Amino acid sequence: MTTLAPTPATVPRGTVAPGPRGVPLLGNLPQWKSDTAQFLLRTQRDHGEVARMRLGPYTVHLVTDPDAVGRVLKENSGNYTRGVLYEQFRLVMGDGLLTTDGDYWKAHRRAVQPVFLRKAVTAIGPNVVRATQEMLDDWELRARRGEPVDLVTETLRLTLVTLSRSLFGYDIRPAAPVLKDIVDNVIEVMFKHGSAGEMLPSWLPTKRNRLIARDRRIFTRLVTEIRDNHAATGEGPLMELIEAATDPVTGARWTDDEIRDEMLTIYLAGHETTAVALLWTLVSIANHPSVAEELDDELSRVLGGAEPTPEDVERLPYTGQVVDESLRMYPPIWIYPRDAVADDELGGFHIPGGSSVLLSPLVSHRNPRYWDNPEAFDPHRFDPDRVKERPRMTYFPFGAGARMCIGNFMALLELRMITAMIHQRFRLQLVPGDFLRYGDTSISLRPMTKVLALPEPREAGARA
């Protein structure tokens, strides 16, 4: 794994955090490679909220103490850079919002921010409804034939189509299968497994590097089509901002490479995470009949069978709590690495400059110190009074601080509207299978196999 910077040999010594025992030379790398998520959960359980581990030559701290998480992401965020892991992201995604820092990142974030503000996000409502209706109409046909749907494929396509229409004014459905392959490859590449091949230079013609180069060529061609469509139609609020963006120092327009990299970042990061969150929300509802019944009551009372609007979302608090609880148990991006520039102290322990810090929503969200019975799915954890009782940084599915996910408002709106639409028309009967395991060797918490469900249409009277 190259997410980490080697620890300098001459850092000042302070109070060293406890951590799991390792083996000579490799340290805890075998445990990391065997089952990363479970290893981190055990590490927090056995060694506390700041725990030190060694992955080969690298010193890493798993940080779940809420105050320390806040210090890394907010109060002292300047000391914690994106880290070497993001060099992996850059191989595929180039220099976009996800991979850059400093003035370049600030200028690019400022350029695209207007589309993602809370008030602006409500404009995507009609596209959410349209794309979801298209999917559900297809489910209706499959239900008549007794055919299951794969929730992984369906949610990925739905969020991709919604994002593309809403931000870029482009119907990406014909290219969706190709883009899904690119996304699958990107998700695999971005998480380091500790293999020797990952350490080789990006210019060597290895199978992995050839695959990355191929994916970037394919997406570059797709970007050209999307830009040509915008030039012809003028549609797409984000395309309008990107095409008009300029460098704040030189005043020069963004280059073709800058536009491509930003579009790739938004396409990949924008729909994958929302799709994974939606999938786990649907699975959780299907597995908890009492949650489904309470959701029924709210949707019937508020919507009465009508399609939800963005304005309706505020009147659906329990629907929002179901989504929030799904994000607690299954945060789509489950690990955030950072590299410490200079020495610091977190939770009373010394963090040497040059070492690395891992923040994991998956681990923090299951800390029994702050979450009663954390393995249970309970949307009422997010009742307002209970939320006030918890420290703020016990829950951060979208990150926090200046680098919080730019699309968090958009994702939450989509998740709540789509959940309401699906639940009003169908009950999902999950097909038994080994899909509830997620792939912890990926940056995304996507299930490891297909998730098959039989959509059972609800009677029209039951929806109202």
Image (tube, helix red, strand yellow):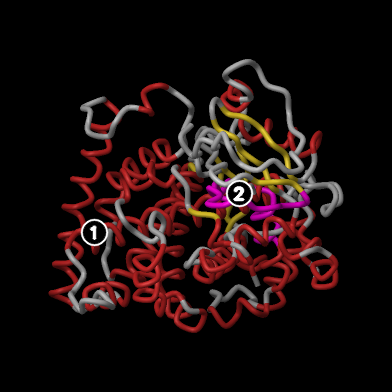
Residue at image point 44% right, 43% down: 84
Rendered location of residue 17, percent (x, y) = 75, 39
Q: Which residues are magenta?
A: 322-348
Residue at left offset 54%, top offset 39%: 452
Residue 71, relative to residue 19: is it above or below? Answer: below
Q: Position of residue 52 (x, y in %)?
A: 69, 36
**In the rendered structure, does residue 445 fall within the stretch colored magenta?**
no
The secondary element bearing badge 1 is classed as helix
Q: Which one is nearer the viewer's eye here, 52 or 65?
A: 52
Residue hosting label 1:
260
Circle 1: residue type: Arg
Q: Which percent across, then down, holds residue 457?
A: 57, 55
Image-quadrant location for residue 25: top right
Q: Nearer the viewer, residue 394 or 380?
A: 394
Residue 183 visible to an observer of this rendering:
yes
Return the residue nearer the eye: 294 or 213.
Answer: 213
Q: Tell me if mark 2 has few (under 14), some (14-19) or many (20+) residues whose alpha carbon lies within 10 angstroms of its own.
A: many
Residue under numbered circle 2: 280
- Whether residue 345 appears in magenta in the rendering, the answer is yes
